[in-house]
Amino acid sequence: MAAKSEPASMDRFIETLSPLHIYPLWRQKGLLLRKPETKAIPFLWRYAPIRERLIEAGRLISAEEAQRRVLILKNPGLDGKPAATSRLYAGLQLVLPHEIAPAHYHSASAIRFVIEGQGAFTAVDGERALMEPGDLVLTAAWAVHDHGNDTDEPMIWLDGLDLPLVTGLECSFFNEIDTPTQKLTRPDDVSERLYAHGQLRPTWVHWTKNYSPLAKYSWIQTESILIDALNDGVAGSPTDGIIFEYSNPITGGAVLPTMACFAQLLAPGLHTEAHRHTTSAVYHVVQGSGTTIIDGKPIHWQPRDTFALPGWAVHEHVNSSSEPAILFSFTDDPTLRALGFYQERFEKRQG
């Protein structure tokens, strides 16, 4: 049995370790934790003041100069890190009338959820997805993409990326192509016509990539599914109400290997049960108003607001109005499940 060391002897011993760039595990703090910890905090970004700043940015810098005219949603708990949660990036992007956001590609995966305007496009791998409010558009890792606005009104959408994860893994790549826009090789919205039909999918297309072949998930179809479920008396999940995941029509899994997307409807008067999970999320309010209580903090939201849910935070949703409320969210769920880190626990209500 080893003798217990004297404090002075231990201190002298530790001083000898620094030149060798080593350190004792028994003195290291914050490495092996009893439960997840994060600096990210529950936080709400109001749409109206951000929209004002976006329009002002449109007068100050072009999309070509900026590459992407985006205002990053920075969680105030993350010490200036450009992220909404520890593993998710979010921002609001503006493309002005008759403007092109130049083509590029990167190792980060991205989603776009349209907030305002209609008729602009995102071109991905030779196909243009025409964008309207509520549409979800995917730009998978390494996929060449550019944005354009041929209309007379500004387009604003929510960007969601796995950038904090990619940069933390030190796997970030970014490249431009030789032309402002990519060559179009497929008809506009062709992937939607091929794949967005329930259980029917084209047998002659052999899709082997690790993300959904659908460039765009139309809000018209998504909203119809939510409203039909409400009218049919579907109760849905005790913690999330009527909630559907946007799925890859080939695999039935998440739309991207690192991020999942959801649309949920909270019926009038609904107060969900409380739970927590290791997954973090960014929510965007499509319709209605309500409150999400996160670790005891009430987040009062209204249309077009965005808010952050840190991982392992206890949360519940409340719709005390007489109208349905609809939320869109994107999460890091697929990453945690693939690595075996997903955990969930039901809790007592906070509110």
Image (cartoon, grey):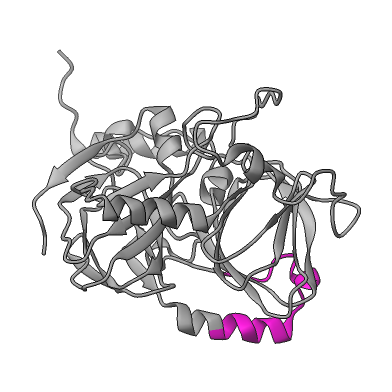
Q: Residue at x 69, y 23 (%)?
A: 206
Q: Is residue 172 left or right of residue 271?
A: right
Q: Which quadrant of the view contains residue 13?
A: top left
Instruction: Describe residue 308's horizontal placement relative to residue 99 as left or right.
Output: left
Give the side of residue 349 with respect to residue 178, left or right.
left
First to last magenta residue range: 52-71
Q: Residue at x 63, y 70 (%)?
A: 118
Residues 307 and 200: in front is 200
> Residue 295 in the image: x percent, y percent?
20, 59
**Pick the front one: 242 or 42:** 242
The residue most toward the left is: 348
Residue found at the very far top of the displayed protein: 1
Observer able to see residue 120: yes
Label the magenta part by its dominant secondary structure.
helix
Residue drawn at 54 percent across, 81 percent down: 51
Look at the image and say whether residue 66 sits in the magenta stretch.
Answer: yes
The answer to whether residue 313 is above or below residue 115 is above
Q: Residue at x 50, y 37 (%)?
A: 198
Q: Is residue 246 above or below residue 249?
A: below
Rendering coords of residue 157 (x, y %) = 57, 66
Quarter of the image where the N terminus is located: top left
Rendered position, 123 above or below 250: below
Q: Using the rendered image of the protein, determine whether residue 329 is visible from the camera's viewpoint.
A: no
Along the horizontal axis of the image, is 253 left or right of 213?
left
Q: Nearer the viewer, residue 66 or 256?
A: 256
Q: Nearer the viewer, residue 56 or 247?
A: 247
